[in-house]
Image: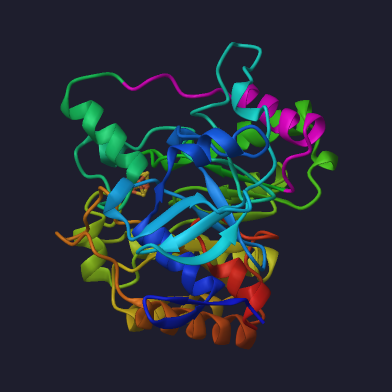
């Protein structure tokens, strides 16, 4: 059973607390950074993708939004990190161990910082290995922080910085797996290219380089690739042949009318069909749990999200539950995430769906902003 707490007069568990922290952020006191950075992985630089670990080993993304959040992270009298809600103590928390990962450079002198992030206790992610053409043309998805970066540069007439090469990616994997043993899972993600065949090719080349430089035998669990859907779904086979364990094409929002408003570049007419064709090709050819689709949960009614999750799970496709982070990215004019009732329906619904269709989401200890693995680990 997950540990329980009292927050704002209500009894909640660690997974509720994770959701509240993702959606509301926290105010982190300067002495937490100062004290814990000596021994743990925590930094005031948001590019280092901070997380904290709640009792019960629940990993939570930590966005420092300053006093705008009712949560505060400070130091307790015993020297441990203490999470409070409106000045009432909630629980002590911990952080992953200290690492030199973010101080490293590849052989081409590209810093790891800004190219890759460590998530939680066992994940290495590449969040944006190529640009997003939708964002460049002013049509970023409303919730997407990476897309917003490209959109802003394009609006100001500034070029994007150069993107990492497959060799850069492979050297980061080599360091994380062979030198510091920081992860068990790799996630390869880019933006979204109009030419999705080219995007698939880029992921393929990254996999080949990882195989050549780091070696797949050093990756104990799995590599997931996130890519755009293809006109010819069979082209996705090259990713499995090159070593991918799972491939995801993210639908993001199941309600089609909302999807077109929230993702104006990514979700034009016909794109839903292309997503489903690519995902069912993978599931039919490689079996259950080999295809996945992320959803940004919190931006559409819970019923439509769960209908989408069940539709995919019934076909052996994993619905990946990523919690919407409203800080700085309003969706349809709203900056406030739904309340816990909404997310409890999400938790109960996906636990039932995972059980009914034997779905196993990716990951081991859990991801920073997704709750699918936590639900699978603790609620089924
Ligand atoms: S298409 Fe992908 S990368 Fe582009 S804005 Fe949408 S979510 Fe972000």
Residue 184 x, y percent position in the rendering: 74, 48
**Image-quadrant location for residue 346:** bottom left
Which quarter of the rendered picture does the C terminus lie within?
bottom right
Furthest residue to the front?
77
Q: Is residue 167 magenta?
A: yes
Please name whichever residue, 293 or 19, is drawn nearer the observer in this view of the structure.
19
> Height in image: 337 above or below 243?
below
Q: Using the rendered view, name the quadrant where residue 257 is placed.
A: bottom left
Name the residue: 49% across, 53% down: 61
In this view, the residue farthest toward the top is 108
Q: Is residue 167 left or right of residue 194?
A: right
- Residue at the farthest right position: 217
Residue at image coords 49%, 47%:
227
Q: Quadrant of the N terminus?
A: bottom right
Identified at 41% across, 40% down, the residue is: 191
**Residue 45, image quadrant:** top left
Look at the image and name its color scheme: rainbow
Q: Is residue 299 visible?
A: yes
Q: Where does the magenta region start and end?
A: 160-184
Q: What percent of the width, then of the height, locates residue 106? A: 64, 17
Identify which residue, 206 or 235, lies in the foreground. 206
Q: Is residue 276 left or right of residue 361?
A: left
Residue 359: in sight, yes or no?
no
| Residue situated in front as seen by the camera: 166 or 34 | 34
Give the tally of numbered discs.
0
Residue 297 within the segment the image draws in magenta: no
Considering only vertical position in the picture, is 120 above or below 291? above
**Is residue 173 or residue 258 the one in the foreground?**
173
Give the x, y percent position of residue 311. 47, 80
Q: Is residue 302 above or below residue 259?
A: below
Residue 286 spot, x, y in % from top left = 69, 63
């Amino acid at each position: 059973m997950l540990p329980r707490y009292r927050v704002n007069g209500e009894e909640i568990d660690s997974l509720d607390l994770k959701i509240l922290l993702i959606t509301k952020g926290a105010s982190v006191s300067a002495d937490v950074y100062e004290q814990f950075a000596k021994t743990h992985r925590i930094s005031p630089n948001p590019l280092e993708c901070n997380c904290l670990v709640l009792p019960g080993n629940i990993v939570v993304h930590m966005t420092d939004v300053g006093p705008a959040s009712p949560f505060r992270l400070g130091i307790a009298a015993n020297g441990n990190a203490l999470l409070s809600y409106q000045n009432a103590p909630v629980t002590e928390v911990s952080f992953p161990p200290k690492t030199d990962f973010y101080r490293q450079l590849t052989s081409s002198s590209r810093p790891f910082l800004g190219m890759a992030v460590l998530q939680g206790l066992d994940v290495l992610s590449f969040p944006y290995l190529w640009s997003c053409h939708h964002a460049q043309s002013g049509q970023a998805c409303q919730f997407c922080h990476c897309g917003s970066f490209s959109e802003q540069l394009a609006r100001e007439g500034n070029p994007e910085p150069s993107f990492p090469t497959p060799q850069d990616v492979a050297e980061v994997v080599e360091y994380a797996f062979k030198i510091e043993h920081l992860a068990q899972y790799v996630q390869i993600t880019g933006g979204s290219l109009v030419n999705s065949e080219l995007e698939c090719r880029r992921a393929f080349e990254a996999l080949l380089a990882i195989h050549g430089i780091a070696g797949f035998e050093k990756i104990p669990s799995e590599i997931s690739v996130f890519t755009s859907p293809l006109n010819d779904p069979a082209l996705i086979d090259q990713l499995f042949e090159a070593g991918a364990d799972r491939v995801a094409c993210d639908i993001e929002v199941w309600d089609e009318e909302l999807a077109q408003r929230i993702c104006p570049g990514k979700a034009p007419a016909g794109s839903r069909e292309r997503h489903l064709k690519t995902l069912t090709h993978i599931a039919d050819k490689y079996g259950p749990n080999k295809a996945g689709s992320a959803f940004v949960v919190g931006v559409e009614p819970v019923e439509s999200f769960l209908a989408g999750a069940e539709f995919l799970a019934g076909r052996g496709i994993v619905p990946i539950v990523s919690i919407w982070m409203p800080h700085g990215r309003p969706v349809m004019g709203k900056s406030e995430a739904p309340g816990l009732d909404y997310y409890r329906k999400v938790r109960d619904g996906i636990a039932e769906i995972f059980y009914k269709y034997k779905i196993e989401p990716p990951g081991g200890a859990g991801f920073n902003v997704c709750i699918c693995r936590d639900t699978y680990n603790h609620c089924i």
